[in-house]
Image (cartoon, helix red, strand yellow):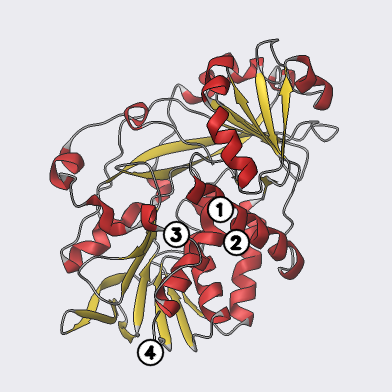
Amino acid sequence: MRTNKPQSVVVIGAGVTGLSTAFHLVEKGVDRVTVIDKGRVGGGSSLQSGGIITMLMATTTEVRARAISLDIFERFSRILDGYHFHQVGCLNLFTPEAFDQSADVRDMWQRNGGQFDILRGAEISERFPDLEAKDSDIGVLDHRSGFSEPHHYISALKAKLEGMGIDILENEQVTGFELQNGEVRGVQTVAGSINADAVVCAVNAWTNHLLSFVGVRIPYKNFVHERFVTKPFDERPRLPAVNDHILNGYVRPTDDNRLLVGTSVDHKAYEMRGRDFEVSELDPHPEALPFIKGNLINRTALLEGAEWDYHTVGLISLAHDVKPVIGPVPGVKGLYLGAHFHSGGFAYNPVSGLLLAEHVVDGGTRIDTEMYSPARFGSVDTDAFLSSPIMHSEMGVTRH
């Protein structure tokens, strides 16, 4: 563990991971924390998030990490003004074949504190009257999980950080790093230099644009991801957050009686044009809404005849192995990375911020995070991967 703890840290990126990291750094005793973003707080893909949270993931490390996230979401519900974690449960739907293949994984969930029921066919609709289910459908209901409204969460967390004395610099682009004997000692911006004992890069889709200043590249791809939101219904929809692995999408209620629906229309990797890229430049996929109308309407009849109000478009970022990247950047002392959370960035952000703060302050983390290490890509031909055209489906789909 570290003996000389940093007294000042710069966090690049004011999305949910960057804000969470700043919060945990201050809680761990860092005197001066500065968050800097080339746009506005949450102005990347964070405000476009579906906000669904589940802890039922594929590996022990991921389940333990998500359990910590749930602990923090529950705590944030108590300490953040204007934020509420909607702990309505998350229903993960599977075909019989996929369910049978996951028996060992379910055992692992239970060993690591998972609290869930298994619902079959009509039991799903009996529990949640606004969901349709075939006799063959199998649901695993994760009781501790649910959803958050990103706009409430981000504004509440920002206000909390400001109350903790954290400086948040918006509309200020990072143009390089301050280096001393090969160690990062701050950042250069369009407005000048900011010195710091450590720097955390939490920009997700923009990672390689920043790491190019120190000659590092991570093998990841960005993909367009969309969410559609209905106009309000007269009554609150009677369903939890749903990860539908059968119909390839997800749906959840909102806090104002709408339905939010996400698509899995297959996209090719999105190539950003440079550091000046803005999420507002993203165009909707012409097949996205027809996909929802033709597919997910079979999951809830509420979508039949529903009036659509608005939709959001953001980027999700997938590393080569479709696992998050959290930890020290190899070969560059003082630089840390938290990015590439597939579609689960919102669900990960409380624990990813905590783990990054532990890396920075303690030199190690409370759980084994080797699988998240930025150094794990040594055997990957990063140049070939980055230059190859690839579809989202070729990398696999991991939800929330």
Q: Earlier in the sequence, mark 1 or mark 3?
A: 1
Disc number placed over residue 64 in the picture, else none: 1
Q: Earlier in the sequence, mark 4 or mark 2?
A: 4
Q: Is residue 181 visible?
A: yes
Residue at mark 3: 368
Q: CA distance from mark 1 to mark 2?
A: 24 Å
Q: Position of residue 232 (x, y in %)?
A: 76, 35
Q: Amino acid at mark 1?
A: Arg
Quarter placement of the C terminus: top right
Q: Which of the 4 image quadrants contains residue 5?
A: bottom left
Q: Earlier in the sequence, mark 4 or mark 1?
A: 4
* Extreme residue in the top direction: 135
Q: Say which element carries label 3.
A: loop
Residue at mark 4: 4
Quarter placement of the N terminus: bottom left
Q: Residues within 10 Å of mark 1 (few under 14, many from 20)?
A: many
Disc number placed over residue 154 in the picture, else none: 2
Q: Earlier in the sequence, mark 2 or mark 3?
A: 2
